[in-house]
Image (cartoon, helix red, strand yellow):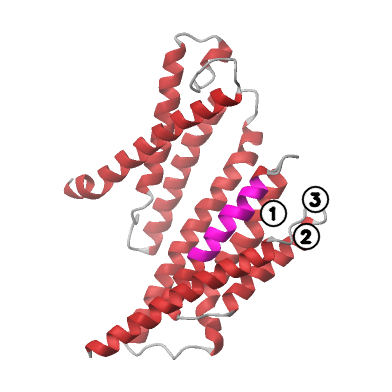
Amino acid sequence: MEEFKKQWLPRILAGALAGMALHALLGVVLSWWNSGQGFQFLDCGFSSRGWQPEWMGALLSFALWALFWAEVGVATLPFADSGRELVVRSLVHYAVTAATMCLWLLLTYSSYGFLEIAAFFLVPLTLVYLLIWLGRWVGWFAEVAAIREKLGLAPGPSLFHWKESLPYVGFAFLLCLVLPTVLRLLDDPTPLLSVFYAFVLLPVGGVMSGLSLGRRHGFCPLYPVACGAFIVVFILTAKLYTNMADGAMIPIAFVAALAGNLAGAAQYKLKQRKGAGST
């Protein structure tokens, strides 16, 4: 109970408040977009179906958004220490999160079937979940390797740190090849998802993953190269079903991962110097 109050409850409350704020912001944006129709919050389809009272639908919509983001807030905590228990609890958390999102979507956009909603919303949610989960796994893997090295159980760094970079290559594969492919397939003629990926998700993911790698192993030049290579593969395969100009994503992926890795390597060197000075 004490752990719940100190760790779980603040995250649940913060997530719920963030969800309600985002829901309110979405209502403002949609009211501005549909100018002339007056201000109205999303109400889980109550108004379109003629269900009364409509304010109950708005409250339900707010509650589902609060619940979803409370579940996101809980995800900032480790679910378990052991591998099997961690996987089981992660799957349960993903299932509950996906169910909450699908319930709101099915109520709000009843004209769409479950398969359409699953394709357009569940697939990106699943990929983001996998990216976060894999990012955490990479961090744990690196921490275990660092402990083994301190105990004298691991060999020295490999050439260009290629072995140390391998766990992060899986993350680069998802970030730079799988995720843009899925978002491109889900995009409509106005490529909002692709633009959001190219200028937000890709640089942020590249910087953060490169930073994590650099903090643990120093400068790893092969990782930015891997990110750029996966983007090249994506561009070549995307030409089969789209005609967008994607060349700008190559330097974005490479520079973002390189900048993050250099920043992390600088912190790694500083940490080593402090450790050497204290001995």
Determine the CA span between mark 3 and mark 2: 9 Å
Contact flag, marks 3 and 2 (Cβ < 8 Å)? no
| Label of residue 237 in the image | 2
For the question of whether residue 178 can be seen, the reply is yes
Residue 184: x percent and y percent? 70, 49
Vertical side of 246 occupied by 195: above or below: above
Where does the magenta region start and end? Answer: 193-208
Give the structural element (helix, strand or loop) at label 1: helix
Amino acid residing under circle 1: Thr
Residue that numbered label 3 is attached to: 242
Residue at point 39%, 51% (across, down): 89
Q: CA distance from mark 1 to mark 2?
A: 9 Å
Picture coordinates of residue 278, whole percent (x, y): 22, 87
Give the amino acid type for the residue marked by disc 3 in the picture: Thr
The N terminus: image quadrant: top left
- Residue in the picture at 67% in, 49% down: 194
What label sits on residue 181 in the rendered view? 1
Q: CA distance from mark 1 to mark 3?
A: 11 Å
Task: Please tell me whether the stretch drawn in magenta is mainly helix, strand or loop.
Answer: helix
Exactly how many numbered labels are in the figure? 3
- Residue type for callout 2: Thr
1 or 3: tag closer to the N-terminus: 1
For the residue carrying disc 2, how many other residues have a C-alpha within 10 Å: few (<14), some (14-19), or many (20+)? few
Q: Residues within 10 Å of mark 1 (few under 14, many from 20)?
A: some
Q: Is residue 91 left or right of residue 114?
A: left
